[in-house]
Amino acid sequence: MPDAAVTLPDLIARKRDGRKLVVLTCYDALFARLLESAGVDLLLVGDSLNQVLGGRASTLSATVDQMIYHAGSVRRGATRTPIIVDLPFLSYQVSIAEAVRNAGRVLAETECHAVKLEGGAAMVPTVAALVERGIPVFGHLGFTPQSVNLLGTRVQGRDTAVAERMCEDAVGLERAGATAIVLELVPSRVAAAITAAIGIPTIGIGAGVECDGQVQVLHDMLGLNPDFSPRFLKRYAQLADDVRDAVARYADDVRHGTFPDASHSFD
Ligand code: KIV
């Protein structure tokens, strides 16, 4: 039996108790229902939907309206699980006023529970402003996909100075009132040091086992995206094979006139 749904204020206690947070991305109502019934603690409507569903090379062209559409769908599918929604590129970086307006729209129009934004010290005033206005914020450090053109897709923090800055960024985000911090593509020892340095949970993806929770991109861990095999991904199913097999059998039935049969037809 899954635990009762975790609420955002529970997260700090979860960290203290050492109970790991199970987080998956989710972009639609159908999967949201399945993930909630499987007992996932938190759902993330990631702007990765721009790549996974939209076939784009990066997250950069995701829009607030797209995030609202998908987040609303997830919320209708998962009625008890806290849902975090990514603020897309340029929806929060231009000014604090725009960040408040866009984050407020996301929560008001979707009834989801928190937003996530990328960045360290430069984002601290924005995080503080959102939190002061009642908007829970998740941070995101390490490899931040909206900065892919600056960073490349590579592990961040192997360099001591970068690792120390990341740790300071995490402390700054916590002081600004962030609820939790995603650490992406960070050496395990650096993620462990950050996890020990702050009171809010860290949620890792490619950041080692010492984080307070783990997040994976749902379609990747289900094996729906077989051409994508980064080191940090573990596949728990091979659904691409199942899809191809099911469609091939359907096509065969249709072509041979064995579907529909009487049991799928009406008098
Ligand atoms: O957009 C996303 O899916 C994310 C996760 C990779 C953490 O930010």
Image (cartoon, helix red, strand yellow):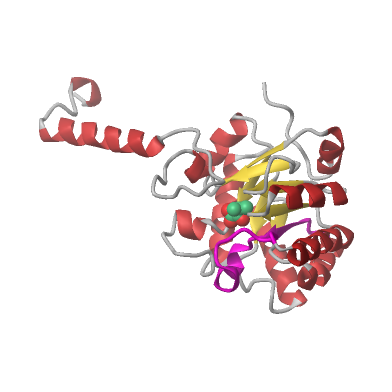
Report the residue at 41% width, 35% height from top: 238
The answer to whether residue 108 shows anywhere in this view is no
Residue nearest the viewer, comparing 67 with 260: 67
The relative height of residue 80 versus residue 263 in the rendered view (above or below) is below
The answer to whether residue 155 is magenta is yes
Q: Quadrant of ligand 1?
A: bottom right
Report the residue at 55% width, 73% height from top: 149
Give the image location of residue 195, x and y in percent: 80, 48
Q: Determine the residue located farthest toward the left in the rendered image.
A: 256
The answer to whether residue 166 is magenta is no
Residue 163, quarter of the rendered image: bottom right
Residue 41, quarter of the rendered image: top right
| Magenta region | 134-158
Residue 80, quarter of the rendered image: top right
The answer to whether residue 4 shows anywhere in this view is yes
Compared across the picture, whether 73 is left or right of 258 comes to right
Give the image location of residue 202, x and y in percent: 76, 48
Report the residue at 86% width, 51% height from top: 197
Q: Determine the residue located farthest toward the bottom in the rendered image.
A: 94
